Image: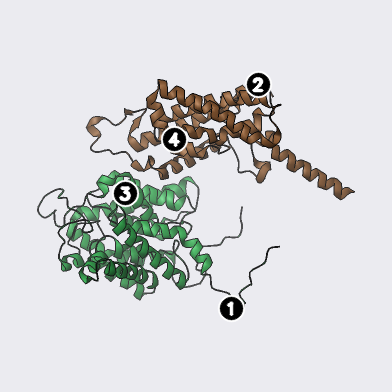
Chain colours: A brown, B green
Amino acid sequence: MSYLKEFTKGLVKENPTLVTLLGMCPTLAITTMASNAIGMGAAATFVLICSNVAISLLKKFIPKQVRLPSYIVVIAGFVTLISLILQAFVPAVYDALGIYLPLITVNCIILGRAEMFASKNNVAASALDGAGMGIGFTLALLAVGSIREILGSGTWFGLPLIPEAAQEAIKPMTIFVLPAGGFFVLGCVIALVNKIANRKPPEATGCAACPNRESCISVEKAESTVENTKKEENK
Amino acid sequence: MNKLFVESSPHIRSAWTTQKIMLNVIIALCPALVMSTYIFGIKALLLTVICCTSCVLFEFAFNKITKREDTISDLSAVVTGMLLAFNLPVDLPVYMAIIGCFVAIVIVKCLFGGIGQNFANPAITARIVLMMSFAGAMTKWTAPFAWKEGVDATVSATPLAAETLPSMTDMFLGFRAGCLGETCIAALLLGGLYLMFIGLIRPATPLCFIGTVAVLSFFYGGCDVNFMLYQLMSGGLILGAFFMATDYATTPLTTKGKIIFGVGCGLITFAIRQYASMPEGVSFSILVMNCLTPLIDRFTAPKALGTVKPKKEGKQ
């Protein structure tokens, strides 16, 4: 696989939010405004790249039995770093993201990439994978956040879209800012991406249908057990 | 493609077609429509017509675009439009009503597979979406007979939140502020009883729904009959209990299930009215119970004739 492919696969084909449906919690919680989406996406991308690089470097030293706690410690370190940076230099973003900033630690996209990619690939590929996934996450957040902000508040990045003269007559639909609207918009965007990517409903279910199966540990295990049982049957 | 088509239940052959059922529901809603036109002026009739037309158009367009069989002739879209209009304040801007029709027909009904396949009542869901979206416009009640005085928008509170209450006869005849079709209790009862009389709806759900709210309000208000009657006649309780909690597709099939459904609606309505920040809870209660309907149906399924209840299977 070329390095370029490691980067671009996160944008659409394996988009962490819209295709593999990871990181739903921050996606639904902070996409009430497009600017939040950028802040969250940038912070998560930073953590994703750094943790991918660090974990890729450390992959030989981390014992398999304690890999998950080790990954979390590495990720938590970078999250602490980015939240201190944000608090110091862009307090507005820090306040807007609130509890969801420290919660990046347990964002399944970051842990998922550490487990599925960084722990098996070299540093450069891991960095590009992190960047691609992070930007894919940011783009998805931006799409959902823009739709929700435009329909729900009548603004985009805080700029009012409804002319002042018409503000009495045209009211934005508040429901798009509420959780129900978040789920609805997310569903519509996923459907749209599936349509654009021309994805058919998977004929196979379970692991065989997963876009991450190539790089997944559990599939290897499952396949090897299948092979083992076949061998035993042959005996 | 799937060659076996299973239509929505009941699978009994009878002279009742969907079209005939819907026509009778429309007839049953007419007295309330006439009264609301009398109370709130010609605007009420206009809003109802707009809602019905846009519902039918949305259904027609959706079926055309998705190349499905055209279903507008079964009149269910007209009923949805009427019920939705009955749940709106009369001075609601028209575009908001049309958004409501879109939600009801396209999102709640057609996307789930059309008539008989929707899990929630379209009109109720549309009302809740509008309520969540345009809280200001959806709670701007027009006072009764404002059209006679030539005042455009006299605003007054719904009796559930008002300080001075209208008299009991005014409440019964519907001379009070409120949603377009929910005010005239007499007309709604007339329509509801008509539907019961011709056998289209079973009395279990409405009776349990209204009964639960009545009993709870009676004790909550300190055994005050007046308080109880106001609680019963204000808000959308009668409209919801007779016309929306009896929807075939979204409510339980068995009588036992219908009773559970009605009591559940009553409990939730009472809880929202007395303990939540909103004055009215009928629509939320019906939506919540709609979501529970598959569960209720599963637990109240009658056992087939001649079979024994299967024993719980142990772990294998």
The residue positioned farthest toward the right in the image shown: A235
Discs 2, 4 touching: Cβ within 8 Å: no
Disc 4 designates what residue? A99
On the picture, is A28 further left or further right than B314?
left
**Residue B73 screen position, x and y as percent:** 41, 58
- Of mark 2 and mark 4, the one earlier in the sequence is 4
Which numbered tag is attached to residue B131?
3
Residue found 60% across the figure and 60% down from its top = B4
Q: Nearer the viewer, residue B128 or B148?
A: B128
**Residue A92 screen position, x and y as percent:** 37, 26
The residue positioned farthest toward the bottom in the image shown: B306
On the picture, is B167 further left or further right than A63?
left
Q: CA distance from mark 4 to mark 3?
A: 29 Å
Q: Nearer the viewer, residue B49 or A47?
A: A47
Indicate whether B168 appears above or below B286.
below
Residue B65 visible to an observer of this rendering: yes
Assess disc 2: are there few (<14), some (14-19) or many (≥20) residues with their C-alpha within 10 Å of its C-alpha. some
Which numbered tag is attached to residue B22?
none
Disc 1 designates what residue? B305
Foreground label between 2 and 4: 4
Q: Amino acid at mark 2?
A: Val
Which numbered tag is attached to residue A123?
2
User: Which of the 4 quarters of the picture holds residue A47?
Assistant: top right
Discs 1, 4 touching: Cβ within 8 Å: no
